Image: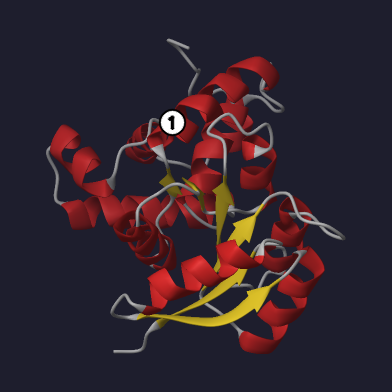
Amino acid sequence: MTPIRVLIADDQMMVRQGFTVLLNAEPGIEVVGQAVNGLDAVAQVAELAPDVVLMDIRMPELGGIEATRRITGPAEATVKVLVLTTFDLDEYVYEALRAGASGFLLKDASAAELAQAVRVVAAGDALLAPNITKRLIAEFSRIAGAPRAPLKDRVGDLTERETEVLSLIAQGLSNAEIATGLVVAEQTVKTHVSRILVKLGLRDRTQAAVFAYETGLVRPTGY
């Protein structure tokens, strides 16, 4: 089985080396490179074609947000970016997701959590640490404001069931949880998710969640 190729981008050598040791010890994962800043990360992605980039947010020369935007921006881009952050209240969570990050993980995560995060993101699923999910919803509540376009104009191509699934994605439910709640097969949910992404021109579930909040399909509550 082809291993998941990982590039680690962080300006701290100890962090890069530590994550390299942890991930190389995991079956099915191979660290193929280390980048010292965002510019280095962009260049190494072009050279090494990793499957996943572990991206620090605050780095010299070019930060993780802009580096993420450059890496995931091209239409043909397939690499996934998993942003690593020290604080669950990181002010840049929202910006990085909009830039194309597929998920977030705190730097104090265990080796098992780190490896699982890499596998989840590589498989095309979104990943948000629970505390960061809470922070993200609070951030949406603060800055999203009114939908940028009428809801009917943004989701008009979706069926009623697809709109329902999109709403549940934005609430953080997995395919299995959505399937249980809707009493359908998990494969049916996967089909709905794929159609949602195609119809809305979105890359992954994380972008779908952002879209759902920005259009007002889902409103943050309870934070």
- Residue 90 in the figure: left or right of residue 125: right
- Residue at 69% across, 20% down: 143
**Residue 217 image offset from top left, x and y in percent:** 50, 25
Work out which residue is located at the far right of the displayed protein and give it. Answer: 61
Seen from this angle, which residue lies furthest front? 14
Could you tell me which residue is drawn at 77 percent across and 79 percent down? 43
Taking 50 as reference, is 61 above or below it?
Answer: above
The answer to whether residue 217 of the structure is visible from this angle is: no
> Which of these two is toward me, 87 or 2?
87
Q: Residue furthest top?
A: 222
* Local SS, label 1: helix
Looking at the image, which residue is at 68% across and 37% down? 92
Image position of 210 (left or right of 160): right
Residue toward you, 110 or 13: 13
Residue 110: x and y, percent? 35, 53
Residue 145 drawn above or below residue 71: above
Residue linked to disc 1 = 131
In this view, 163 is above or below 4: above
| Residue 143 at least partly seen | yes
Q: Residue 22's image quarter?
A: bottom left
Residue 81 left/right relative to 129? right
Query: Mark 1: which amino acid?
Result: Asn
Q: Quadrant of residue 95?
A: top right
